[in-house]
Structure formats: structure tokens, C-alpha cells
Image (cartoon, rainbow, N blue to C red):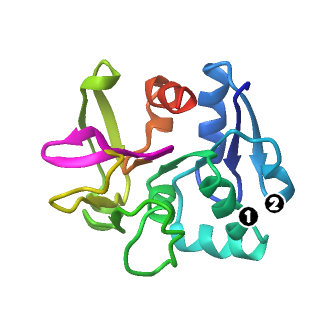
Amino acid sequence: MPVLCGVLAVQGSFGLHARVLERCGAAWREVRTPADLEGLTHIIIPGGESTTMHKLGAHYGLLAPLARAIGNGMAAFGTCAGAILLGDGPPPPPRLGLAPLIVVRNAYGRQKESFTADVAMPSLGGSFRGIFIRAPKIELPPAPPPGTEVLGRCGDAPVMVKYGRMLLATFHPELTGETRVHRFFLDM
């Protein structure tokens, strides 16, 4: 089945993800309504403001159909705010809770504590320059859920985790000019 990737386009850096998908040669479309989910094999939930993204997703009736589609096997990639929505953790915002991973919002601090750092990603061909903007942290329990694979670390912190057909990243790969992370996701 050919890949057709949606990009949740209610708020956040969706346009930048679309540009990376174009550079990857991937077929894609913006997702703003439940009907836009039809026929997708993959979806990217971009970085942005997670509470606003949740409110707009609820307003457009997207959250339940999106959760159903991902639960039925659609591959999902959440970056920053998208990882917050896919994971679990205390509100705000309410979470979709599709990945049983705790994702702590603004874990490094506010905007002024944003940073860039190398992300070690051996399975994706080496290091990657990560851009962390009001970044969340993924907290893994001592025994992570089956199907959990840490693909990227910044120091000791897991910053890109695969769980089944979901990929959660606490950084913004769409801002770097790199395509490796997106290509990996499209191949999932």
C-alpha cells in the first residue's frame, strides 16, 4: 500500500513538516477535519502549543476519529506538542494517551530555556542536531512497556521513542533541514 501522510494542520509547525515530506518525495495532505483522515497511512502531529492544539482538535471534532485511526494501525509521529498529545501525563492538556509513556510538558523550562543539542541516534546513522523549544521530557519506567524502543538520546534523556507504530520526539526535526527522522517515520 502506498504511503499517504497527513499533517495535523490546526496549529503549530505543520507547514514545516509538509516541506520536509515534499523533500522526501512523500504524498501528503493537511488534516483539519475528520474527513481528511480518510485513506491516510501515516499522520504527523506537529509541535506547537499542546493546549491550543487539543482545544482546536476538539472544536473540529478531530480527536476521537484521530485516536480511532491511530488505534486501528495508522502510524503517528508526534513532535514536541504532538508527543505530549500522543502520550500520557498530567493535564493540561487532556491527552490522547495512545502511547503509555509519560510526557512531561515544558520539562526543561520556559521559552528562554530552549536549546539545541546533539541527539545520539545510532539506528538512524549517527547524531542529529536537535532543536528543543519549551521541550517536554519522556519519562520511561524502569521496565518500559513492551514495544518501546528508544531511538534517540540527548545525554541520558530519551528524546525520540518508538512505541508500536508511534514515534514521539521531544525536539523539532522539521526545523533542521534533515530528512532522516521523517524518512524513518514514513518507512514505519
Residue placed under numbered mark 2 in the picture: 34
Count of marks placed on residues: 2
Q: Is residue 64 left or right of residue 174?
A: right
Q: Residue 67, percent across and down? A: 63, 63
**Image spot of residue 112 (x, y percent):** 30, 61
Q: Residue furthest right?
A: 35
The amino acid marked with disc number 1 is: Pro
- Tell me the number on the disc at residue 65: 1
Q: Position of residue 115 (x, y in %)?
A: 28, 48
Q: Nearer the viewer, residue 132 or 65?
A: 65
Q: What residue is shown at x 76% (from left), y 45% (from top)? A: 30
Closer to viewer: mark 2 or mark 1: 1
Q: Are marks 2 and 1 in contact (CB under 8 Å)?
A: yes
Which residue sits at x=70%, y=29%? 3
Q: Mark 2 is on which residue type? A: Pro
Q: Is residue 61 above or below residue 185?
A: below
Q: Between residues 122 and 24, which one lies in front from this camera angle?
A: 122
First in sequence, mark 2 or 1: give its number: 2
Q: Which mark is residue 131?
A: none
Q: Which image quadrant is residue 155 in?
A: top left
Classify residue 126 as left or right of residue 8.
left
Q: Please identify the dominant SS of the magenta region.
A: strand
Q: On the rendered image, what quadrant is the N terminus found in? A: top right
Classify mark 1: residues with Cα within 10 Å, few (<14), some (14-19) or many (20+): some
The segment highlighted magenta reads 149-167
Question: Would residue 158 be counted in the magenta stretch?
Answer: yes
- Mark 2 nearby-residue class (10 Å; few <14, some 14–19, many ≥20): some
Front one among 17 and 115: 17
Q: Residue furthest front?
A: 146
What secondary structure is marked by label 1? helix
Residue 145, percent from left and from top: 31, 57
Residue 136 figure quarter: bottom left
